[in-house]
Image: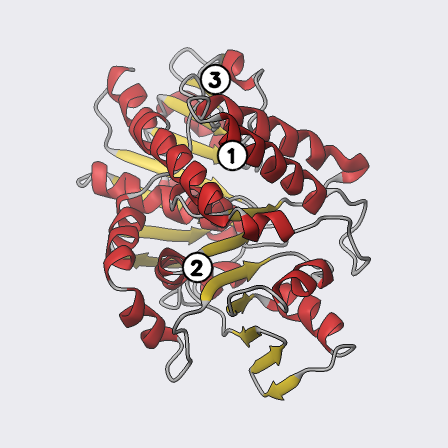
Amino acid sequence: MKVNSIDIFCEIIDNFGDIGVVYRVSKELKKIFQNVRIRIVLNRLDEFKAINKRVKDVDYQEIDGLIYVTEKYLEENIDSFGTADIFIEAFGCNVFEEYIKKAKESSKLWINLEYLSGEKWIEDFHLQESLIDSKTLKKIFYMPGFSEKSGGVIIDSGFLERKEYGAENREKVLEKYFPNCDFNNKLVGTIFSYERNFENLLEVLKDYDKETFLILMGEKTHKSFSEILQKKLTENFGKIVKYGKITMMYADFLSQEEYEEVISVVDFNFTRGEDSFVRGILLGKPFMWHIYLQEEKAHMDKIRAFTERFKESVEDISDEDKKVLDYYLNLLEEYNDRDTNSFEKGKEDFKEFFENFDRIDFICKKYSKFLLEKCNLVKKLYKYIQEY
């Protein structure tokens, strides 16, 4: 299929996840479709301005060859702007009616990009058609996932470059973002989460046989640690707090690219949502995932589905490693088992996570290799479009 234009619609609700994914996909598509006009349509700009410091508060702007336009502005100018050959509806964001009406007459492919899921049933729905009233426009479901038969996960070249650079330049990157901090002989990790209680983690690390340095990222993470640390006997140096053998730093907000540089050089990453979680697993380092909370604990079904796919993908490991993996995946479930985002103490125990850190690191590297080789979403999407 010859493509001249692509539109990507994204509705930002209350977090950075959706725009983070769309921003990443659009940048990678531009590298593949270099001469294709790509527009990203957003309902608002606040979160995008936070993750990309070049974004301005205007209705229409171009950054690195990509056009960003507000939904309101596109709607007001739809007659002159027109539609695209392909348009992507990210996460059921409901493209406005006038656009759909025109697209049924002039567009070729409507891609319904769903949320990432490990559930097995998505493999049967991936690339299936949804019938619409049009002779020229076809609508398909694109189901991102953790298996070869699914749509895969977003693996963009920019991230891979930062991953490779970080592997060879740990000290340089840490000095760039956290000058004058002492990381020598310390286990270094990042924490990025929704509101939660981290007391269990701190109690394990304060007496751990190795000193640790935790880089605390995001307002909700800062709030979570402040809630606990005000009750502990700590040494407070402004942005840096010490508790036992732990040094913690309240980091400033980073852009998407800056965040990726940092997580590529540390030893482990606690991630949240979807975008940072996928970066965490692709790095092949020990990780924890704080999944987005859903009503009636529906998020726990998603966690269990992911752990099942994880197990399937690293079956060729020793019996001892399998025991460690069982513990690790159970810890991941306990870490997320909640009805609300609160500061209530959980039941997760991180002792074995750090005692078996090297084994978990080995397992995560195997899993990352599988995803990198078999589950590249943009490559899969590009292949589908080319063969359409």
Task: Identify which residue is drawn at 78% across, 39% down.
Answer: 295
Question: What residue sits right under mark 3 in the picture?
Answer: 126
Q: Which comes sooner in the sequence, label 2 or label 1?
A: 2
Amino acid carrying label 3: it is His
Instruction: Give the secondary structure at mark 1.
Output: helix
Instruction: Give the secondary structure at mark 3.
Output: loop
Foreground: 196 or 28? Answer: 196
Quadrant into which the N terminus falls: top left
Task: Identify which residue is drawn at 66% across, 59% down.
Answer: 201
Instruction: Give the secondary structure at mark 2.
Output: loop
Question: What residue sits right under mark 1 in the picture?
Answer: 98
Q: Quadrant of residue 104?
A: top left
Whole-Å distance between the Cαs marked 2 and 3? 34 Å
Query: Residue 6: where, in percent of width, then height?
Result: 33, 36
Task: Identify which residue is drawn at 66% across, 56% down.
Answer: 194
170 left or right, relative to 326: left
Q: Above or below — where is 111 with respect to 198?
A: above
Q: Quadrant of residue 166?
A: bottom left
Foreground: 232 or 63? Answer: 232
* Circle 2 or circle 1, nearest the eye: 2
* Circle 2 or circle 3, nearest the eye: 3
Q: Which comes sooner in the sequence, label 2 or label 3?
A: 2
Query: Residue 347: where, in percent of width, then height?
Result: 77, 49
The answer to whether residue 92 of the structure is visible from this angle is no
Query: Residue 243: where, in percent of width, then height?
Result: 64, 77
Question: What residue sits right under mark 2 in the picture?
Answer: 59
293 left or right, relative to 373: right
